[in-house]
Amino acid sequence: MDNEFVRRESIINTAEEAISLGISVEGQTEAYFAKYVLGRYLAKHNIKLGEPIILGGNVTFARVTGTLALLADEYDYATSLYDFYGFQGKEENDTLETLLKKLYADSNICYKNNIYIYLQKYEYEALLFSNLDVMCNYFYDSESEKNLCKRKFVDNLKGKKPEDVNDSIQTAPSKRIKKIYKRYQKIMHGYIIAQEIGIERIRAECPLFNSWVEHLLGLSKTVNK
């Protein structure tokens, strides 16, 4: 009986050691990705992702840092999934690095060490370029259509890695997909294609995304909020 009690208590303690992670996201597509793709992946590593807080496309300095500050108080850690491309209030000459530096310096969060801000370069859809075969297979049924779809993407991307695909407002990742597959709908298709591709393939093709996931997998229960 004593051994059985110890075994049960051990199971309970193991479950209690799960790390809680709050996340704020840009829109519904990112929320679905966080909940059904990233969240399930992190759960295998004893990290429990909370219900995503959606900013509804209105991603500003004040809303981002305010939301992350609240999440950092509620969870062990807080993180984000916003597009650099659509971040409001950034200056014309801002890079991913300079924008992140400004966010971390904000008075709402500068004193907290349990926040990891992730900005997708440049847009969520960039992740879908990690596997063109999977994307085209999802869009089309016939082999000829799938092959044509892939050729169009290869020509369009011109050898760029997924996170480097962005030249202007007209050539953002989502616009490129829409140009080749006109029926593309961000909310409906976005997270399902990512789910089919899988986190590991996305990590292999997207270094910045991989760094974010690596950081999350390295979280521990020791934290100073």
Image (cartoon, rainbow, N blue to C red):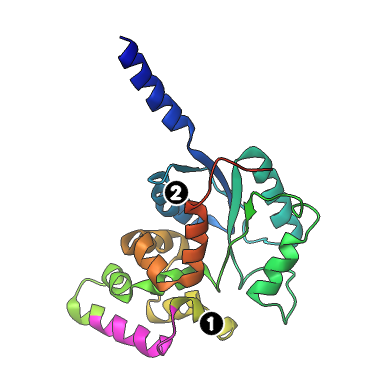
Mark number displayed over residue 166? 1
1 or 2: tag closer to the N-terminus: 2
Q: Is residue 6 visible?
A: yes
Compared with 169, 209 (above or below) is above
- Residue 70 drawn above or below residue 183: above
Type of amino acid at the residue the image marks with label 1: Asn
Residue 30, horizontal then vertical, whole percent? 51, 58
**Total count of labels:** 2
Indicate whether residue 151 is drawn in magenta.
yes
Residue marked by disc 2? 39
Measure the C-alpha gap from mark 1 to mark 2. 27 Å
Q: Secondary structure at mark 1?
A: loop
Question: In the picture, which quadrant includes the C terminus?
Answer: top right
Q: Nearer the viewer, residue 168 or 214?
A: 214
Magenta segment main secondary structure: helix
- The residue located at (67%, 60%) in the rendering is 58
Q: Residue at x 28, y 74 (%)?
A: 133
Q: Hey, which residue is sitting farthest left in the picture?
A: 143
Q: Are marks 1 and 2 in contact (CB under 8 Å)?
A: no
Q: Is residue 10 left or right of residue 80?
A: left
Residue positioned 37% across, 45% down in the render: 44
Q: Position of residue 19 (x, y in %)?
A: 51, 40
- The amino acid type of the residue labelled 2 equals Gly
Reply above or below: 71 against 193: above
Q: Foreground residue, 164 or 136? A: 164
In the rendered structure, which segment of residues is drawn in magenta? 147-161
Question: In the rendered image, which quarter contains the N terminus?
Answer: top left
The picture quadrant where one finds residue 86 is: bottom right
Name the secondary structure under disc 2: helix
Q: At x 44% / y 85%, what residue is drawn?
A: 160
